[in-house]
Image (cartoon, helix red, strand yellow):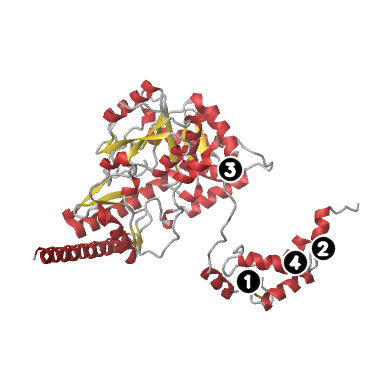
Amino acid sequence: MVQTKTPAQKRIRKMGARQIYEALRDQILESVYGADGLLPSSRALAGELGVSRSTVTVAYEQLAAEGFIDVRPGARPRVAKAVAEARNRDTRSRPSSRKVRLSTYGQRLSQVAPRPSEPSRNFIANFRYGDLSPSDFPVLAWKRAVVAAMTRRPTKLTYDDPSGSRRLRTALRAYLWRTRTVRCEVDQIIAVNGSQQGLDLCARLLLDPGDRFVMENPGYLMARHVFSATGALAVSIPVDTDGLDTEQLVKTEARLAYVTPSHQFPLGAVMPIGRRHQLLAWARKFDAYVIEDDYDSEYRYDTKPVPPLHALEGSENVIYLGTVSKTLSPTLRIGYLVVPPELRSAFAAAKLIMDRHTPLAGQDALATMLETGVYDSHVRRARRRNGERRQALLDALHRRFGDRIQIDGAAAGLHVVVWFRDLPPTSEAALIEAALAKGVGIYPVSSLFDQRRQARRHRPDVVGLVMGYAALETRQIERGCELLVQAVEQLRSTRHATRQRRRQLDYQNLR
């Protein structure tokens, strides 16, 4: 049977070598093909465009003659290095005269969204929180679980339950009960693409513009951003050595509260049982929801596990949020919510509209690891390794700084907060630059405080750093602390010299 070509196919047939050459040249100049990037083979591109191979060859020969690509016998064409270098020297984008028209939500989002991550540097030691060591990832176990998931999946390819595969949710139900004493039904669990999507679902479903939500101060910025994007108003409640100050909370009416009671982020406090009951009583009084982010409860070193809010009596308004980003990898984007029964259908519908469902292969692979006990074994191994890193960091900090620093949040988690008693906040930027010049990445805790004018009284009066250690080996931690000492001493010397010059100027002015 002879098939009739569509008009689009007929137009493609008319494409000549000149048009192919111009299209590829523009794509190279616009970085569609990166530095030293490979172009399709002449045979593959001819097949895609529906033209003869000789037509593509002519286009490639012209590109090679003009120095855009390198052509070698038996190999795919490659972007010439000279072109890539010239392109990197001129990275200016063309200004757009088109007026941007965003929805109200889009306008709010553009105001609160964080800046993109900086390009990675060759750090000697990067103390950024959230990164994990590649050596800790269970490559073979995950590979076996993925292969098993792919072979187990039915031959019929269909969409799945937006709440997540029932197999994974069943495995998570058992895991949460045995590790965190969380009791729930399978249908209360919603699989999400990382904890951030879980927060986004909560924001969209529970907040309207003008509603109020409670945030810990300091606290997790991405939660603040996602709630603020709805048009809701943040109410910052300060954090002390016992976590969220519930005495101030009980005076506040709000639609929901976001808390990290098992290991407050970033200061590391563990909320005592009395405050937990006060928090739950507040939620019942105002018919508000409490989002309990249990982001790193697997890592406890000097303290016994505290029952989560969700496991306490009177926790009907608690939404429990968990993730594998701190145990396996943030790149997997697998998290989960445990929602009250009355919210299950609303969350499932929102997940359906948002992205249909979380990728199934990853869900099934995680379910396999949970069912076989491999995940539990991996967590114990990761806890031991991170405990060694934690101890190496504490030893290095105490040995090199002594009583000039105070360390908070070391009993659990994957980071500590280090306060430099003799460095005022005005020296923070200079310290970061001095450390960066020595190849050390450090990150201030000040950025996690409410930046609004009315909340300034809660900001720290000394420099504080959030120092993550899960991505570093012990030798990197030791070397990083050594270089950090040098950066601090360099900063102190500069400040001392500046004070001396000021004194001299003051003395001269007096004369």
Contact check, label 3 and label 1, Cβ < 8 Å: no
Q: Residue furthest bottom?
A: 65
What amino acid is found at the position of numbered circle 3 in the picture? Leu
Mark 3 and mark 1 lie on one chain; the one further toward the N terminus is 1
Q: Earlier in the sequence, mark 2 or mark 4?
A: 2
Q: Please determine whether, in this image, residue 493 is positioned above or below residue 462.
A: below
The reply to whether residue 96 is in sight is yes
Question: Which residue lies most toward the left here?
Answer: 511
Marks 2/1: CA–CA distance: 26 Å
Are the two marked residues, 2 and 4, in contact with CB atoms closer than 8 angstroms?
no
Which of the two labelled residues, at mark 2 and mark 1, occupies the earlier sequence position?
2
Give the amino acid at mark 1: Arg
Local SS, label 3 = helix
Q: What is the CA distance from the residue labelled 2 to the residue labelled 3?
A: 42 Å
Compare residues 481 and 443 and report the one nearer the observer: 443
Q: Is residue 406 left or right of residue 251?
A: left
Q: Label 3 vs label 4: CA separation?
A: 42 Å
Q: Position of residue 51 (x, y in %)?
A: 80, 65
Foreground: disc 3 or disc 4? 4
Mark number, residue 19: 4
Mark 4 and mark 1 lie on one chain; the one further toward the N terminus is 4
Q: Which residue is mark 1?
A: 78
Q: Secondary structure at mark 4?
A: helix
- Mark on residue 120? none
Q: Are marks 4 and 1 in contact (CB under 8 Å)?
A: no
Residue 179: x and y in percent read 39, 36
**Residue pointed to by mark 3:** 360
